Image (cartoon, coloured by chain):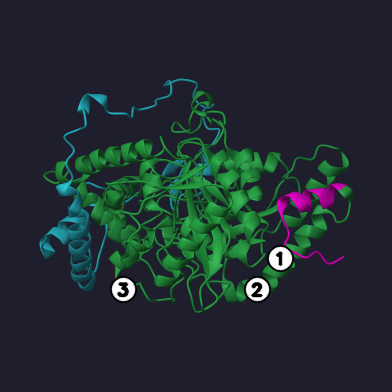
Amino acid sequence: MQLEDVKKLADLARIEITDAEQQEFLDNLTSILSYVKQIESVDTSELDDAEYPLRNVMREDAFPYESEKYTEKLLGEAPDTYDGYLKVKKILSN
Amino acid sequence: MTINLSNLTIEYAHEAMMRGDFSARELAEAYIETINEKNNDIHAYLEVYDDVLKQADDADKMIKEGKATILTGIPLALKDNILFEGKIASASSKILENYHATYSSTVVEKLKSAGAVILGRTNMDEFAMGSSTENSAYGATKNPHDISRVPGGSSGGSAAAVAMSGALFALGSDTGGSIRQPASFCGVVGLKPTYGAVSRSGLMAMGSSLDQIGPFTKTVADAEIVYQALASHDPLDSTSAPDSFRIQPSPLKKKIGIPRDFIKKEDLNPEVYENFEKAIKKFESLGYEIIDIELPRAAYSLAVYYIVMAAEVSTNLSRFDGVRYGLQIEGKNLLETYQMSRGVGFGKETRRRILLGTYVLSHGYYDAYYNKALKVQRLITLDFKKAFENVDAIITPTSPFPAFKAGEKMSDPLQMYLSDIYTVPANIAGIPAISLPHGTSNEGLPLDLQIMAPHWREDILFTIGKAFEALEK
């Protein structure tokens, strides 16, 4: 991993990090990755991929809440709202 | 009247309130007095709620009307990542500084309808990431046994609250050891139930395939009482197990397994090693047969954990965007608002794990890290399954060392992560595990014992745990 990779990851994760932190995170991530890499050596050939034990549990896309039941409460926790909507900076330049 | 809180149990307090020895209000007042006296030094609580006495009066009313349950009037503390409608829940993060829960978690609903009294919310490592409670945006919690040391983490505030007799029990969450390790450091009982036993609805998600809510108590019997009150299927949590999964207790073989290949003498603090050998002798004296077992792939648990957990953290924490809740730092466009709000709102460890998770899920690394980790996780689960064919339970130390000094591991994340080497396997396999106080170090710090059982066999932890605990008295 290089310094550039850390910058790229921070961009992907939408997180601002300072220049000083970039070097620190590079050192940390390098050491953590070299530790977790030990799983490479585990032989997993005894597993049958067709027998994956987990499955998704979905609920029916039905029985919605009564409209506006929670609107006020949820918006009350947002930093910036306007007329029942979340307000954000514009994303397109003129 | 003066109520002696230091040896109080749920069962005793319940009986005393039923007899009228003291009221729920008097009990709540006694706890608030203790908190006022000790919390400045320990910093277990971030907030004591302003309606505690009102809750206690409601409990007294239930008792008078003959509607009391075993938890009516019992005062408890909540980890700051568990929602209680209308109260602040910040997960000890700046990004949720003034966030008020818009609904109550299922565990809070259950406790409230049982008449329990919720005293306040406790400090934690931010978003439950850490092993020392030093990663809180609101200052570190201190270990009540030695304030120069950490209480463990991430549920360090809940552990310390019970240890300082500032709550009769507390709830925490355990993703890789966040209940059991602080229970060990603070000398209390900590239970991580089977994955899916207790509803996670209203628990802020960290590693969703691993997270589980559980209690901190003074005794095993109290842990059992809280577990019984909380464990049931909840349609609001899709990973909550249906009743058909919850098997009934069956007789014990009276055999306990020791994974010698996993607990190596050289990895352990010498006092911890000696203390563990003493625990084995005690089980022999109780008539248990001790059997050496193998968990050949358990040693990979921590590596698997730091891939799977980080991947899930990076996904779960994407909702904190500076728009929908909490802190917003305004940039010149929306992208900058995201970056600045998350950059300022999240602490260092949280950002480190988000970056790690983003990396292991990224194109080109996904198979080598994430998919491989899921496979190794399956193998570890199979190792436990095979071992449990011959034994009721497996014992290990909870922590490889007693409570460490504040600041000692903050500069080296990997060293901090290694605190969880013996707790993480139970999360990886989804099995229940309990940490019991057992022995003290030469410096007077609490030592521990961890017991693990097969899926849905919490009853084994309680049976064995109570027998072991009785020897200590």
The subunit carrying tag 3 is B
Indicate the quadrant where residue A49 lies.
Answer: top left
Q: Amino acid at mark 3?
A: Ser
Q: Position of residue B347 (x, y in %)?
A: 36, 64
Q: Which residue is mark 1?
A: B6
The subunit carrying tag 2 is B
Q: Which mark is residue B38?
A: 2
Q: Position of residue B114 (x, y in %)?
A: 71, 40
Visible residue check, residue B331: no
Q: Within the magenta stretch, is there residue B11?
A: yes
Q: Which chain is cyan?
A: A
Q: Which residues are magenta?
A: B1-18
Q: Is residue B90 left or right of residue B76?
A: left
Q: Residues within 10 Å of mark 3 (few under 14, many from 20)?
A: few
Q: Can you say which quadrant of the picture contains the C terminus of chain B?
A: bottom right
- Name the residue: 11% across, 44% down: B364
- Name the residue: 41% across, 40% down: B430
Q: Amino acid at mark 1?
A: Ser
Q: Which mark is residue B113?
A: none
Q: Which residue is mark 3?
A: B411
Instruction: Work out whether residue B126 or residue A13 is closer to the camera in this orientation and state it.
Output: B126
Q: Earlier in the sequence, mark 2 or mark 3?
A: 2
Q: Position of residue B463 (x, y in %)?
A: 60, 44
- Name the residue: 76% across, 58% down: B28
